[in-house]
Image: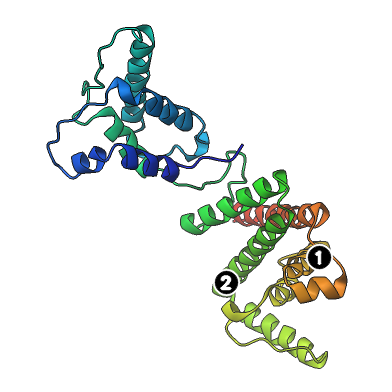
Amino acid sequence: MPEIFPSQITDFIVRVFPFVERELDGENVNFTVRELKWGVIEALVWMIERLPQYLLIGDNYVEFLSAMGEVRAVIKAWENNSDIPVLRELTKRHTPNHPLTVIYNYLKSCPDEGPLPKTNELQFITDPDFREILRIDISAANQALANGGWKAATVLAGSVIEALLLWVLQLKEKQDSKEFKKAKTEFKAGRKKLGKKVPPSNINQWNLEEYIGLSLELKLISEEIKKSCDLTRDFRNLIHPGCAERKKKTCDRGTALTALGAVEHVITDFEKQYKASAASP
């Protein structure tokens, strides 16, 4: 069954009941939702009940629940009196605004994406916004895997690894610029010696291969984790038609599992380093 998102429901509400936006703008509107809309109201409740619970994190949740209770009560009243040819009204009761306006306003404050409840908290990352972005990407990669989206899972996992390595390298540069500068110079010299492209001075302009190499140089990752990251990088490159054609490979369940496994290895290793650092005097 396709997923339902808050924005889809708010679009539906405002299309069928345009008064909700006028009321939120402060207009004193008189309106009734009559039994003629019975099916529409039931469809609305059906959609809301199928929203992923982890997305229901908007403001005024209690008011939202109260409004939903009023809507369900009216549906029940319609069901019990369906043989009476009287159009019943869904009226204002306990809140200044109409229940549908309350529901609409709440869902407008809910995101369309968010990390699944069991997604790693990434507590070692101090920037809350960056942490939340990564958690959403990790969650999306796992959902893609569960839904058979091998390419999406592989690419997202590779992007998470790249973001994590860049973050830890930037942190190392701030904490120990002397050691970082020395390692970066040696890493670039080693690439030049091998005839490889030498990356620019600003590490923000580097690619995943270079982040992996410098992270190993600084002992931020182990040789084993480097191998997992390199495999993920190779798999992520399969999104390019030329690369896929040359290697005669495509993204599949194996590449997705390998990439997500690499993400877990990197996170676990960084968590250990974070805990060791926090425990040291």
Q: In this view, does 22 lie to the left or right of 109?
A: left
Name the residue at 12% across, 36% down: 28
Residue at which label 2 appears: 170
Farthest residue toward the right?
Answer: 248
Q: Amino acid type of disc 1?
A: Leu
- At numbered mark 2, what does the secondary structure look like: helix, strand or loop? helix
Name the residue at 51% across, 38% down: 54
Q: Is residue 164 above or below residue 114?
A: below
- At numbered mark 1, what does the secondary structure look like: helix, strand or loop? helix
When asked about the image quadrant of residue 173, the answer is bottom right
User: Alpha-carbon neighbours of circle 2 within 10 Å: few (<14), some, or many (≥20)?
Assistant: some
Return the disc, 2 or 1, that comes first in the chain's sequence: 2
Q: Is residue 224 left or right of residue 163?
A: right
Farthest residue toward the left?
Answer: 28
Q: Position of residue 171 (x, y in %)?
A: 57, 68
Q: Position of residue 120 (x, y in %)?
A: 62, 46
Given residues 79 and 183, the one toward you in this image is 79
Q: In this view, does 244 lie to the left or right of 50?
A: right
Considering the image in quadrants, where does the N terminus appear?
Answer: top right
Residue at which label 1 appears: 231
User: Alpha-carbon neighbours of circle 1 within 10 Å: few (<14), some, or many (≥20)?
Assistant: some
